[in-house]
Image (cartoon, helix red, strand yellow):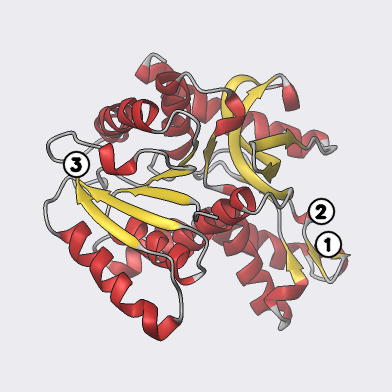
Amino acid sequence: MSRKKVTVVGGGFVGSTTAQRIVDLELADVVLTDILDGPPAGKALDMLESGPITRTDSRATGVSTATGDYSATAGSDIVVITAGFPRKPGMSRDDLLKANFEVVKAVVEQIVKHSPNCVIIVVTNPLDAMAQAAFKVSGFPKNRVLGMAGVLDSARMSSFVATECKVSVDNVHSFVLGGHGDDMVPLPRYSTVAGIPLPDLLPKERIDAIVERTRKGGAEIVNLLKTGSAYYAPSAAAVEMVEAILKDKKKILPCAVYLDGEYGIKGLFVGVPVKLGAGGAEEIIQIKLSAEENAALQKSSASVRELITVLGI
């Protein structure tokens, strides 16, 4: 049986760490692409040479797509898109939005040509809008285009909860919905420690502090790093989604998916609980929200819609 194939587009910190995790877990053979000539091949060769030590037979190859040649990615089961520009000083959010839209558009056009049956996982920011762009450009059915955000945001919340409660992260399950930004919607009521709802364990002010830190999780790391942004947790989150799909796990994870009326939201990518399996987003799980939680989700989706309006997609 031939191994599965995953292409990771973008050989920066998020992309290369995603590729390394997939290889280390022996989930698939990986093609790492970048517009730079040399670094993706060098990183892939370095991963390949670690195989005898980590005892993994998954193979990594790295290719430059500077000429627009994506033939090495042909027949991929999953394509993870991490390519894009980071926000630079003096750059407006709209500038970043339009620049990364052009990157995602060019990448997706090639993906469709070479891997017409793949599942696309978008990691490029602003995430929900870029997932929507990939969906529109690809023409794929909605179950085969996903955005990675909720898994990362929920992991951040879980790590803060585990630290606060002094328990194993294994005991903690957190739920974060909505867009990947300041308007994301952490749900303490659906977050548990060993099955016990968070509000039964912690006072409201401690929960509120955890929710606030979760919302600003990415910014906290950016401020500490000075240059660049998070990549260990984002890559781990993307790989959890990759594994659920490749192994047909039917695992429920919060992901950005195209909503067609679910949660009262239509025609928009927003983070909600999704069952991931071989078909990609196989089912959207609808949970009951309080009026306050629903209002927060609608506010979050409105922020995403603003970005989509700017792009005109």
- First in sequence, mark 1 or 2: give its number: 2
Q: Where is residue 302 in the image (x, y as percent from the top left)?
A: 56, 25
Q: How crowded is mark 3: few (under 14 residues within 10 Å), some or many (20 or more)?
A: many
The residues bearing labels 3 and 1 have C-alpha atoms spaced at a distance of: 50 Å
Q: Which residue is drawn at 31% across and 71% down?
A: 48
Which element is circle 2 on? helix
Q: Where is residue 270 in the image (x, y as percent from the top left)?
A: 59, 33
Q: Which of marks 3 and 1 is in front?
A: 3
Q: Where is residue 67 in the image (x, y as percent from the top left)?
A: 12, 36
| Amino acid type at image mark 3 | Thr
The residues bearing labels 2 and 3 have C-alpha atoms spaced at a distance of: 46 Å
Q: Which residue is drawn at 22% across and 48% down?
A: 34
Q: In front: 163, or 235? A: 235
Q: Look at the numbered discs 3 and 1 and tell me whether their residues touch, using CB distance below 8 Å.
A: no
Find disc 3 in the rendering and name its residue: 65
The residues bearing labels 1 and 2 have C-alpha atoms spaced at a distance of: 6 Å
Q: Residues within 10 Å of mark 2 (few under 14, many from 20)?
A: some
Find disc 2 in the rendering and name its residue: 189
| Amino acid type at image mark 2 | Arg
- First in sequence, mark 3 or 1: give its number: 3
> Going by the image, does 180 lie left or right of 96?
right
Find disc 1 in the rendering and name its residue: 199
